[in-house]
């Protein structure tokens, strides 16, 4: 299994429960909308600022997205377990580690963006009341 396949498989495990009819529609929309924006945020603002921007929203769906990204990022640092530890590790990283973590986060975030569109039906052009 390639690294991209591992990223995709884990992202699918994370996103699939939100696609079920029993899932909360508001949470699905908030999660999906931010998942669509996250790759762009990482590219434009940088990983650290992007993570803290999402965290600052203080919404459970967005914390869930960061927790999911943290699970993807365990490959870069075994000390990463959740949104809080992910933010700490990124803030404290030296330059080469930061660049590497940024690339890994971007590659993973792109899977959440794709799956939020295909599995959750969240449309990039349509923005729910945020």
Image: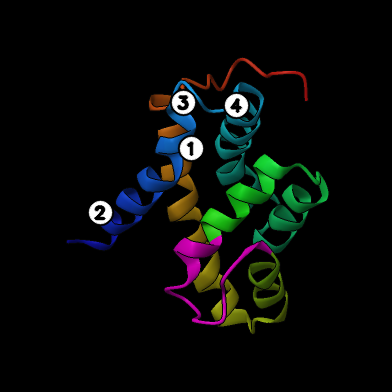
Q: Secondary structure at mark 4?
A: loop
What is the tally of numbered marks visible in this picture? 4
Colour setup of the view: rainbow
> Is residue 55 at least partly visible in the picture?
yes
In the image, which is nearer the foreground, mark 3 or mark 4?
A: 4
Residue at the image point whose x is 36% and y is 43% from the top = 12
Task: Answer with mark 4 or mark 1, whichever residue precedes in sequence.
Answer: 4
The N terminus appears in which quarter of the rendering?
bottom left
Query: Disc 3 vs disc 4: Cβ atoms closer than 8 Å?
Result: no
Residue count near mark 1 (Cα–Cα under 10 Å), binned few <14, some 14–19, many ≥20: many
Q: Secondary structure at mark 2?
A: helix
Q: Is residue 2 above or below residue 79?
A: above
Please state the extent of the stretch shown in magenta in the rendering. Answer: 70-83
Tell whether 120 sits left or right of 31: left
Q: Is residue 90 above or below residue 23?
A: below
Query: Disc 1 vs disc 3: Cβ atoms closer than 8 Å?
Result: no
Q: CA distance from mark 3 to mark 4?
A: 11 Å
> Is residue 114 at least partly visible in the picture?
no
Task: Answer with mark 1 or mark 3, whichever residue precedes in sequence.
Answer: 1
Q: Which mark is residue 5?
A: 2
Secondary structure mostly seen in magenta is: loop
Residue at the image point whose x is 47% and y is 72% from the top = 74
Tell whether 8 sits left or right of 73: left
Closer to the camera in the image, 56 or 94: 56
Disc 1: which residue: 113
Task: Answer with mark 3 or mark 4, whichever residue precedes in sequence.
Answer: 4
Disc 3: which residue: 120
Query: Disc 4 vs disc 2: Cβ atoms closer than 8 Å?
Result: no
Task: Answer with mark 2 or mark 3, whichever residue precedes in sequence.
Answer: 2
Q: Quadrant of residue 93?
A: bottom right
């Amino acid at each position: 299994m390639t690294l991209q396949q591992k990223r995709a498989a884990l992202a699918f495990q994370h996103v699939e429960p939100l696609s079920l009819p029993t899932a909360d529609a508001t949470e699905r929309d908030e999660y999906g909308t931010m998942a669509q924006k996250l790759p762009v945020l990482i590219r434009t603002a940088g990983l650290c600022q992007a993570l803290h921007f999402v965290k600052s929203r203080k919404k459970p769906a967005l914390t869930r997205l960061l927790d999911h990204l943290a699970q993807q990022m365990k490959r870069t640092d075994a000390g990463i377990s959740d949104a809080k530890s992910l933010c700490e590790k990124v803030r404290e990283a030296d330059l080469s580690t930061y660049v590497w973590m940024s690339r890994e986060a971007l590659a993973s975030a792109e899977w959440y963006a794709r799956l939020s569109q295909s599995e959750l039906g969240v449309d990039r052009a349509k923005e729910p009341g945020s």
